[in-house]
Image (cartoon, rainbow, N blue to C red):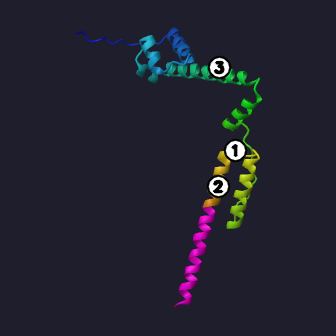
Amino acid sequence: MKAKTRHKTQVTEEIISQVQELAKQGFNNILISQSLNIATQTLSTNKELKEAIHRGKLELSKKVTSSILESLESNPTNQQLLVKRLCLFTPLVDIKKPTTAKEALDNLATATKQYADGAINESQLRTIEAVSNSYTKAYEVTELEDRIIKLEEKFK
C-alpha cells in the first residue's frame, strides 16, 4: 500500500479567502483542513491563515449576535432575560465594607433584598454572601479565642 504523499500548501489569496469563508460558516480547523486539503498544523501555524480564521469567526459571531438580537425585538421579556444573563447592564452594589459581624449580616440582608427586588444579579449576591460569611466566621473565631484566653487567665 502506497503512503499518502504530503504536499506543502501554497498560501494564496484564494486559499486565505476560502479559509475565512469556511470559518465564517462555522467550520472548525479540522473541517477547514479536510475541506481544503490543508494540514491542520498549517492552519494553526501560518499567520495569514490564523488571521483569516479569526476574521471568519468574528464575522460569524457578529452575524449570530445580530440574529439573536433581531429575534428578540418583538419579545421584551426575552430581552430582559438576555440582558440579565449576559450582565450587560450590571448595577453597582452600594454596600460598605463591614467592620463588625453585625454590619456583615446587615450587608447580607441588604443584598438579599436587592436581589429579590431585581436590583442586583445572583453573582453579585453570591459575592456579598461569601464576603459576609467569611467576615462573620472570622469574627466568631476571634471572639471565641478571646473567651478562651479570658477563661485560661481566670483559672491560672
User: Is 110 within the magenta?
Assistant: no
Q: Main SS type for the magenta part?
A: helix
Tell me whether the residue at label 1 lies in contact with that at label 3, contact meaning CB atoms closer than 8 angstroms: no
Asked whether, in this view, residue 65 is left or right of residue 8, the answer is right
Badge 1 element:
loop
Task: Name the mark on residue 129.
Answer: 2
Image coords of residue 26 (percent x, y): 54, 19
Asked whether, in this view, residue 29 is left or right of residue 62, the answer is left
Residue displayed at 74% across by 56% down: 110
Mark nearest the camera among 1 and 3 is 1
Relative to 40, say whether 85 is above or below: below
Mark 1 or 3, nearer chain start: 3
Image coords of residue 140 (percent x, y): 60, 70
Residue designated by label 1: 121
Magenta-colored span: 134-155
Q: CA distance from mark 2 to mark 1?
A: 12 Å
Residue designated by label 3: 63
Mark 2 or 3, nearer chain start: 3
Mark 2 or 1, nearer chain start: 1
Amino acid at circle 3: Lys
Circle 2 crowding by C-alpha within 10 Å: few under 14, some 14–19, many from 20: some
